Image (cartoon, rainbow, N blue to C red):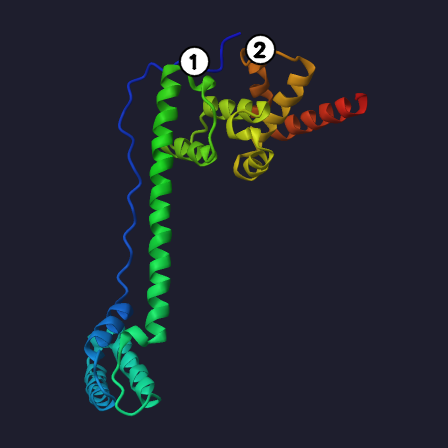
């Protein structure tokens, strides 16, 4: 019987990377920041004067159709009004300071958290791409079977599938199924196997379940001897899962 892990002899081609989407311009946020920079150090009287100027500009802008959707202008006006109210409630003689403005500080904290999250996403995407490159090379060398799976390889499988135009790469799925059934690599941890059940497709999980039961029926059987298990899984994953469950119940009743 032929091995399910044939070495690849094809020439490797550069894999296109998904472009990182640019963040849309937030005109309202730009308006808030402009106002805050101008208002820094202003007293209540100075802010009130600036507010009147903003209101005048808004009235003038309302007369022009092309300024009807002036998001930044409306945001600047609203920010002057907010700062005006903030100083009205403050002690006499107080000057506006963004460093003590709770609204500004909350926004800065939220922006820092969002930036940290984006950075973490970029690092994870880079890790997945590098691991996908590694597995692709191992597939071409015909040594994928000997590779230990790592945490996060479920996402790497998705990346390899995306690169292949969403074509399911059978050798990668077979590798993961065998590793899951044999509890290899990070799948030695029961928690990792539970997590994998939520991340891997049904057909792969059914394949792993059938391999688990076949291993009990034929201890010591090699990967090449169990290659046939992939065929019924591909044809009917649900029936394969039912067969694995039946064999498990039978084995449990005999023990």
At x 19%, y 84%, the residue is 57
For mark 2, what is the residue?
Answer: 225
Front residue (pair 100, 152): 100
Check the image and report above or below for 214 versus 188: above
Q: Is residue 248 left or right of residue 124?
A: right
Task: Tell whether label 1 touches label 2 (CB within 8 Å).
Answer: no
The alpha-carbon separation of the residues under discs 2 and 1 comes to 15 Å
Estimate how packed mark 2 is, as few (under 14), some (14 to 19) or many (20 or more) residues with alpha carbons within 10 Å. some
Does label 2 or label 1 sit earlier along the sequence? 1
- Name the quadrant containing residue 147: top left
Residue at 37% of width from left, 63% of height from top? 110
> Would you say residue 164 is visible in this rendering?
no
- Residue 149 x %, y %: 47, 27
Identified at 46% across, 36% down, the residue is: 152
Q: Position of residue 84 (x, y in %)?
A: 29, 86
Which residue is disc 1 drawn over?
A: 6
Q: Secondary structure at mark 1?
A: loop
């Amino acid at each position: 019987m032929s091995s399910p892990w044939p070495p690849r002899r094809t020439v490797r081609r550069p894999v296109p990377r998904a472009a990182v989407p640019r963040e849309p311009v937030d005109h309202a946020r730009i308006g808030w920041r402009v106002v805050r920079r101008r208002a820094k150090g202003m007293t209540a009287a100075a802010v009130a004067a600036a507010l009147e100027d903003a209101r005048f500009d808004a009235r003038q802008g309302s007369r022009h159709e092309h300024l009807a959707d002036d998001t930044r202008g409306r945001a600047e006006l609203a920010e002057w009004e907010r700062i005006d109210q903030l100083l009205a409630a403050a002690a006499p003689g107080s000057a506006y300071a963004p460093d003590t403005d709770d609204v500004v500080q909350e926004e800065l904290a939220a922006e820092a958290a969002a930036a940290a999250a984006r950075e973490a996403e970029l690092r994870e995407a880079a890790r997945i791409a590098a691991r996908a490159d590694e597995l692709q090379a191992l597939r071409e060398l015909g040594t994928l079977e000997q590779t230990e799976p790592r945490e996060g390889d479920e996402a790497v499988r998705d990346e390899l599938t995306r690169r292949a135009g969403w074509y399911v790469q059978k050798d990668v799925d077979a590798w993961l199924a065998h590793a899951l059934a044999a509890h290899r690599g990070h799948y030695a941890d029961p928690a990792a196997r539970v997590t994998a059940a939520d991340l891997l497709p049904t057909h792969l999980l059914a394949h792993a379940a059938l391999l688990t039961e076949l291993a009990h029926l034929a201890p010591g059987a090699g990967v090449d001897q169990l290659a046939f298990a992939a065929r019924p899984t591909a044809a009917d994953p649900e029936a394969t899962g039912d067969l694995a469950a039946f064999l498990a119940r039978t084995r449990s009743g005999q023990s």
